Image: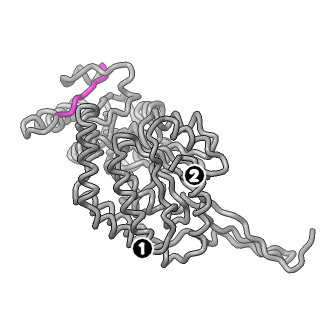
């Protein structure tokens, strides 16, 4: 099918979901999850071909994003079942108002209609997006990068098999077959077909969608995430949090990219940070973190000199930019100037410092004494996520079912005229 054929099918099919119950949708999601697991061997075989084609062309950490195994496929299926267990957002009465003239005005949540997702090398987005769209009453158009196409195609075929078993149209979940830039451009300008476009990937993809889309578009994903170590921080907590935020999975958008340390703590903390992220990891045979240091930090520990762009780069790798700040205010100012509004954290035992940080740092998720790696739909109780919105309208942070609905007013009268 051409991209236009897929767009037309999605538009024609989307109203079907308005005619079925929450129980019907949950049953479909369960069958889709079952089909995913049943097709594990086919999906892994397709993924192996993607991995082979990508090896040597993308970094090892990006290969990890691409890789699927039985456990990851089971996790994808679990995410779908978790979505099925959540309350149905469609038809929710947000507000009800009885007017003096007798009119009953109700604000009711309704699906967007057709949601398109452009994403890159994370095959699990395929099932996450499909589950959230079906449960929230939307048809789903998927457009994946060429690195993950075979994997995403195998996943989509498994999901469509589950839809068919449930008696749902397969056109509710479709994968664009063209991985060239032209198909992405078609989605960006598919006025009348696409009600919401969600780009999920690197800065270049998101910028291209935001700048060129004529359909409604949500800015997501790019994460220059900071952890600020205050002068009143518990150093052991700070080391554990930073190690997790930087090294548990450096290729994802909620991984830490910048560490800011109060100057009163720097002399003690930075050597401990280097020992934990560099020396100990080398001794354990793990990839050490490259520390890119500002001038003050480089006077305390050894590392690379921070370049002019290092505090504005989403590394998605074992690299951490390090800055020493003279005060809490300077740290907040630096974060507000360089953050992408995704996730930022403070480590401190000082309640006043924590309150000031959470009030002034204008990001979708702001943490006190916790890793930025928790910014995730599953961790936030949303089942899974469509992406992390870094804008303020209409969604912000992990996007779950509610963010994939809009609303309309339903007004009931009894012959009322104005």
Answer whether residue 29 is magenta in the image. no
Name the residue at 49% across, 47% down: 389
**Residue 25, position in %: x, y?**
48, 73
| Residue 254 coordinates in the image, percent (x, y) | 36, 45
In the structure shown, which secondary structural element does the residue marked by tag 1 occupy? helix
Magenta stretch, residue numbers: 288-295
Residue 7's disc is 2
Residue denoted by label 1: 165
Q: Which quadrant of the structure image shows residue 246?
A: top left
> What whole-number distance in Å separates the C-alpha atoms at marks 2 and 1?
23 Å
- In front here: 397 or 37? 37
Mark 2 vs mark 1: which is more N-terminal? 2
Q: Residue at x 58, y 34 (%)?
A: 211
Q: Is any part of residue 411 visible from this angle?
A: yes
Colouring rule applied to residues: one colour
* Residue at the far left in the pictured view: 283
Residue 357 visible somewhere in the drawing: no
């Amino acid at each position: 099918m051409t991209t236009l054929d897929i767009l037309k099918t999605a538009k024609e099919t989307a109203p079907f979901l308005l005619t079925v119950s929450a129980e019907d949708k949950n049953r479909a999601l369960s069958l889709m999850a079952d089909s995913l697991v049943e097709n594990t061997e086919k999906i892994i075989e397709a993924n192996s071909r993607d991995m082979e084609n990508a090896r040597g062309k993308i970094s090892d950490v990006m290969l990890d994003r691409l890789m699927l195994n039985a456990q990851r496929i089971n996790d994808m299926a679990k995410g779908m079942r978790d979505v099925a267990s959540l309350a149905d957002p469609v038809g929710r009465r947000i507000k009800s108002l009885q007017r003096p003239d007798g009119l009953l005005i109700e604000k009711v949540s309704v699906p967007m209609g057709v949601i398109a997702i452009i994403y890159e090398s994370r095959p699990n987005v395929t099932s996450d997006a499909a589950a959230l769209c079906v449960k929230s009453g939307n048809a789903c158009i998927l457009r994946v990068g060429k690195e993950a196409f075979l994997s995403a195609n195998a996943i989509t075929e498994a999901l469509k098999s589950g839809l068919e078993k449930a008696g749902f149209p397969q056109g509710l979940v479709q994968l664009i077959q063209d991985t060239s830039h032209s198909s992405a451009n078609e989605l960006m300008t598919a006025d009348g077909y696409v009600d919401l476009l969600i780009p999920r990937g690197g800065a270049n993809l998101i910028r291209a969608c935001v700048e060129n889309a004529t359909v409604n578009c949500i800015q997501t994903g790019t994460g220059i995430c900071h952890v600020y170590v205050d002068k009143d921080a518990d150093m052991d907590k700070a080391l554990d949090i930073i190690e997790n935020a930087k090294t548990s999975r450096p290729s994802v958008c909620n991984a830490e990219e910048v560490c800011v340390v109060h100057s009163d703590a720097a002399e003690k903390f930075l050597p401990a940070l280097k020992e934990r992220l560099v020396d100990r990891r080398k001794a354990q045979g793990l990839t050490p973190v490259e520390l890119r240091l500002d001038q003050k930090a480089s006077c305390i520990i050894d590392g690379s000199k921070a370049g002019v762009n290092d505090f504005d780069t989403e590394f998605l790798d074992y690299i951490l930019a390090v800055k020493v700040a003279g005060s809490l205010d300077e740290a907040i100012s630096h974060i507000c100037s360089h953050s992408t509004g995704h996730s930022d954290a403070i480590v401190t035992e000082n309640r006043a410092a924590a309150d000031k940080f959470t009030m002034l740092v204008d990001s979708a998720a702001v943490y006190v004494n916790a890793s930025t790696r928790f910014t995730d739909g599953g961790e936030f109780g949303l089942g899974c996520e469509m992406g992390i919105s870094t804008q303020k309208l209409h969604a912000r942070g992990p996007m779950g079912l509610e963010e994939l609905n809009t609303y309309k007013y339903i007004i009931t009268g009894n012959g009322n005229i104005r």
